[in-house]
Image: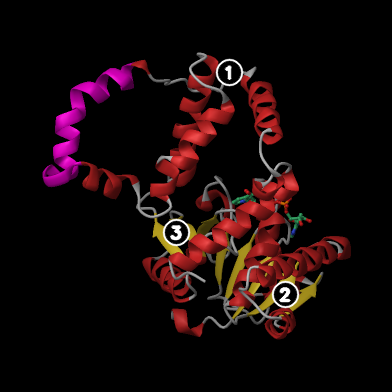
Amino acid sequence: MEAKDIKKVACVGAGVIGYSWALYYSLKKLSVNVYDITDDALNLAKIRIHESLLNLKKNNVVTDEEIKEIESRISYTTSMSDAVKDVELITESGPENYDIKRQMVEEMEKYTKDDTIIASSTSGLLITEIARDAKHKDRFIGAHPYNPPHLIPLVELTKGDYTTDEVINTAKEFYQSIGKEPVVLQKEALGFICNRIQMAVYREVCNLVMKGVCTIEDADKAVTYGPGLRWAIMGPSLVFELGGGKGHVDGLMKHLNSSISLWLHDMADFKDFPEEFASIARKGVEESLKNRPKEIGNDDESLAEYRDKMLIEILKLHNKL
Ligand SMILES: NC(=O)c1ccc[n+]([C@@H]2O[C@H](COP(=O)([O-])OP(=O)(O)OC[C@H]3O[C@@H](n4cnc5c(N)ncnc54)[C@H](O)[C@@H]3O)[C@@H](O)[C@H]2O)c1
């Protein structure tokens, strides 16, 4: 199968991630079957899709007319057979648990075509293990999105031991064709690329706060108004390429190496977050929210709304919307 043959997709599991994938596919003019195990779960997905569309309308991304079209391309069902029998790609976003995902694989394979690509949203389980009992192990991939998938372009693609190059290449081309930015991991790695980078940063946030160097609020402020602004435009290596001036990135690394080495030796390298940090982070976030005006988000709801509004503006600058 080629990427251009993928016209219809199924989203199996329609929670926080599944509904958002379904919305994205429909925004990109694909027909989508949404499957979940209960009508209540499907109704919630429908509501979330509608609310997200209203938010996109508020930010001038879609019109009322387009909302109707987008919603009309999405069907909802609790029948696995109806969901997967005529699709070319399935996005699996069920609970993060091998037993449940394997059960879902068994159900999907009963009804789906033999060459349908099955892409798991798993945040960290191994594709080889998810597909352990599958009939056609070669067509399983990991396609790890960032929340919310209908706004964040990154998708980290992973192969299992049996995944063919043809399948991963088709998937990569498909995601590119619908405006995603796929990155293929050359080998499986726990946490993929970005969760590792995020946790490296957050480990140091924890370290700085626990040592009394800064508050949670100031660490967030430092990232948002410092490197975060640059990272929304280009990655850390390109940022350092510019930081190196005529010496480029290698010049910067050589020039600062002895100084960087001092910081690295002083930085955290713990393997488990200290238990007390969870409540320290929570208190820090509460304090931080108290100090923010409503228009940039000062509770979870307004914060999510502000995040999506700003993401939309940044995506427009990237020509991604
Ligand atoms: N939440 C995130 O930020 C995030 C980010 C990236 C990836 N993921 C991954 O996406 C997947 C889904 O996570 P989520 O946050 O959407 O979880 P969620 O709990 O919001 O949704 C899971 C959905 O799966 C449904 N479900 C349960 N059993 C099922 C079955 N047998 N068949 C089909 N559907 C079933 C549930 O009813 C629910 O709607 C997980 O693998 C998770 O690791 C989550």
Q: Colour scheme in the image?
A: secondary structure
Residue 245 is inside the magenta segment: yes
Which numbered disc, 3 or 1, marks the residue that appears first in the sequence?
Answer: 3
Say which residue appears at 62% left-offset and 73% top-offset: 60
| Residue 162 image label | 3
Contact (Cβ within 8 Å) of mark 3 with mark 1: no
Residue that label 2 marks: 83
Closer-to-camera residue (198/258): 258
* Disc nearest the viewer among 2 and 1: 1
Left or right of 311? Residue 51 is right
Residue sitting at the far top: 211
Q: Which residues make up the magenta segment?
A: 244-265
For the stretch drawn in magenta, what is the main secondary structure?
helix
Label 1 secondary element: loop
Left or right of 218? Residue 193 is left
| Residue 256 image label | none
Q: In this view, does 62 lie above or below 95?
A: below
Residue sitting at the far right: 40
Label 3 secondary element: loop
Q: Where is residue 55 in the image (x, y as percent from the top left)?
A: 70, 65
Looking at mark 1, is its residue's CB closer than 8 Å to ligand 1? no
Q: Position of residue 62 (x, y in %)?
A: 64, 77
Left or right of 151? Residue 303 is right
Asked if one can make out residue 106 in the rendered structure from this viewpoint, the answer is no
Say which residue appears at 53% left-offset and 62% top-offset: 313
Q: How many C-alpha atoms fall within 10 Å of the one at disc 1: few (<14), some, or many (≥20)?
A: few
Q: Which amino acid does label 2 sit on?
A: Ala
* Disc nearest the viewer among 2 and 3: 2
Which numbered disc, 2 or 3, marks the residue that appears first in the sequence?
Answer: 2
Q: What residue type is labelled 3?
A: Tyr
